Image (spheres, helix red, strand yellow):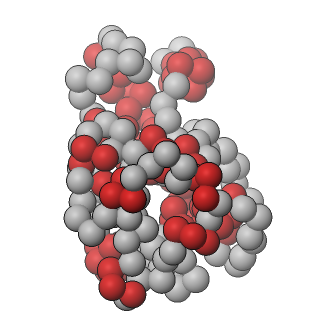
Amino acid sequence: MSEFSPNLTPKEVIQLGSFGGIYFYDNGGTININHKEFPSDWFKGLDEFQFKSKKYNRKVNYFKVKSGLSQEEWEEKGWINNQDPRGWFQWYCRYFLGRRTDDDERQIQRWNNFCGEKGRWRNYIYSKIFNKGTTIEDLSFSLAVRQSLLHWGYMINNDDFDMWKLKNRS
């Protein structure tokens, strides 16, 4: 199995501000998800609109931008497995809590393709930072990419950026 090393726990993803606050909204029962399936401390200190809102609110997100595709777009692309109808993050929450299924390898590969060491968006953001001659703290660009990485359990950081520079610019 591929390496799987998110640097954010599901709790951190939720607490930092993610998915425009709509992730745990069940759409009137058509999407099988209930935040009560997960530890209550993941939601401690949050108002319900920060994780179970009917309407997407970019201000809930850590980077205050809209990021990600809709549920319908994920379904059209074939990225949804019936066991986790809300997608990768639902799978990650359950995986983090110890569940193992025959979908693990596919989901871990998706994570690696997105934000693993060779992942498209992780490399994109580090390349952008390097080419601009700036730091990871410079929030003047690519906020949607950073927010998407957060949704996938990854926050860019100086250690990984230094490793990226050694591998890609030496």
The percent coordinates of residue 69 (x first, y second) are: 29, 63
Residue shown at the point (31%, 46%) measured from the top left = 60
Tell which of 155 and 111 is nearer to you. Answer: 155
Answer above or below: position of 31 versus 161.
Answer: below
Residue shown at the point (70%, 78%) measured from the top left = 102
Residue shown at the point (49%, 77%) measured from the top left = 33
Tell which of 11 and 102 is nearer to you. Answer: 11
The percent coordinates of residue 30 (x first, y second) are: 37, 88
Tell which of 38 and 122 is nearer to you. Answer: 38
Answer above or below: position of 109 versus 12.
Answer: below
Q: Is residue 46 visible?
A: yes
Quadrant placement of the N terminus? bottom right
Q: Is residue 112 visible?
A: no
Q: Quadrant of residue 76?
A: bottom left
Locate residue 10 relative to residue 142 in the image: left or right. Answer: right
Direction top: furthest residue = 133
Q: Quadrant of residue 144?
A: top left
Quadrant placement of the C terminus? top right
Tell which of 130 and 107 is nearer to you. Answer: 107
The percent coordinates of residue 57 (x first, y second) are: 23, 53
Residue shown at the point (27%, 69%) measured from the top left = 54
Locate residue 124 relative to residue 139 in the image: left or right. Answer: right
Answer above or below: position of 84 versus 170.
Answer: below
Locate residue 76 relative to residue 57 in the image: left or right. Answer: right
Q: How many marks?
A: 0
Q: Quadrant of residue 145?
A: top left
The percent coordinates of residue 166 (x first, y second) are: 57, 18
